């Protein structure tokens, strides 16, 4: 843990990663609204997401910053590639298996990110964060305790690939703090669109209403979520950043309830409360420690 880090900087990192989790959690809501193959969704979502992030990049750093999309550097290219791999895995996983199956695997990300950070950076998580991660994982296990058996193996495998890619991206972001993460976020979206293009069979069938939904999907869920996470995760230990992002899990069920009147089961509500409680406890504990020190 970075004990000498300013409290305001860590607080900003927590706020940014929390905002990212809220944005990311809307993915099942948008996916349900779009009757297209996953590659078509990925193509348009990446195009809109990358476009908005590029606009943010120009506003923040000036037109010259667009050159970073062409020459991202080794660290930037690695982060963009891992991010693109995570995004490419995510949408098909949501379509191939139950939303909560994907959610439970997302909740394992703090463990994966903390393990990778320990192996690569020698970055040890605090006992508070480790215990909170275990509580969060238990909460998600309760959430999915009532799901049907025989979930699609392909969707689960893609979810595992996504978790590994995003966890590795989190660690690489910490390793390459000098890299422009806003430019990298834009590049990852464009890479995702480029890879999806040859397989996107429904591009010509996207109408005005669907295009508007895809624009909101790309701008809200991808552009803002990814930008917030990349900026925030560089200010926090990898395990803590991933733990806060676990808020995405119960919020996924919340958006499905709001948009499609699908009321979560009691076990989902209990599990979600544990996840949110674990994250809030970790954040509050960190704040108390920073004040006392």
Image: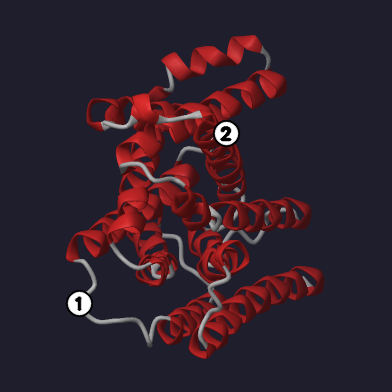
Q: Is residue 286 above or below residue 11?
A: below
| Image location (x, y in percent) of residue 120 | 34, 53
Q: Position of residue 81 (x, y in %)?
A: 34, 35
Choose between 226 and 176: the one closer to the eye.
226
What residue would you read off at disc 1? 150
Instruction: Indicate left or right for 170 with 285 as reference.
Output: left
Q: Position of residue 58 (x, y in %)?
A: 65, 18
| Residue drawn at point x = 69 percent, y = 77 percent | 285
The label nearer to you, 2 versus 1, is 2
Residue 240 circle label? none
Q: Is residue 140 visible?
A: yes
Label 2: element kind = helix
25 to 189, vertically: above or below: below
Q: 202 or 157: which is nearer to us?
A: 202
At 64% from the left and 61% from the top, the residue drawn is: 3
Instruction: Look at mark 2 in the image and give the residue it sits on.
Output: 212
């Amino acid at each position: 843990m970075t004990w000498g880090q300013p409290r305001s900087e860590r607080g900003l990192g927590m706020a940014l990663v929390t905002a990212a989790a809220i944005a990311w959690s809307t993915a099942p809501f948008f996916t349900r609204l779009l009757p297209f193959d996953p590659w078509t969704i990925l193509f348009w979502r990446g195009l809109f997401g990358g476009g908005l992030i590029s606009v943010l990049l120009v506003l923040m750093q000036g037109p010259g910053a667009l050159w970073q999309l062409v020459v991202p550097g080794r660290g930037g290219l690695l982060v963009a590639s891992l991010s693109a791999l995570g995004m490419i895995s995510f949408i098909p996983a949501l379509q191939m298996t139950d939303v909560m199956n994907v959610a439970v695997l997302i909740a394992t990300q703090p463990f994966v990110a903390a393990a990778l950070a320990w192996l690569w950076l020698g970055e040890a998580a605090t006992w508070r964060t480790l215990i909170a991660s275990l509580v969060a994982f238990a909460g998600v296990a309760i959430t999915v305790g009532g799901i049907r058996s025989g979930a699609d193996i392909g969707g689960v495998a893609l979810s595992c690939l996504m978790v590994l890619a995003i966890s590795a991206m989190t660690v690489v972001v910490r390793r390459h703090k000098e890299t422009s993460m806003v430019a990298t976020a834009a590049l990852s979206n464009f890479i995702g669109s480029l890879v999806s293009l040859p397989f996107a069979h429904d591009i010509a069938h996207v109408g005005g209403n669907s295009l508007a939904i895809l624009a909101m999907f790309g701008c809200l869920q991808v552009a803002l979520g990814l930008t917030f996470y990349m900026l925030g995760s560089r200010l926090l230990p990898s395990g803590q950043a991933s733990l806060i992002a676990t808020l995405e899990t119960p919020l996924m069920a919340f958006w499905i309830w709001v948009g499609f009147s699908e009321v979560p089961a009691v076990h989902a509500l209990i599990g979600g409360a544990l996840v949110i409680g674990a994250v809030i406890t970790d954040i509050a504990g960190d704040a108390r420690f920073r004040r006392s020190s």
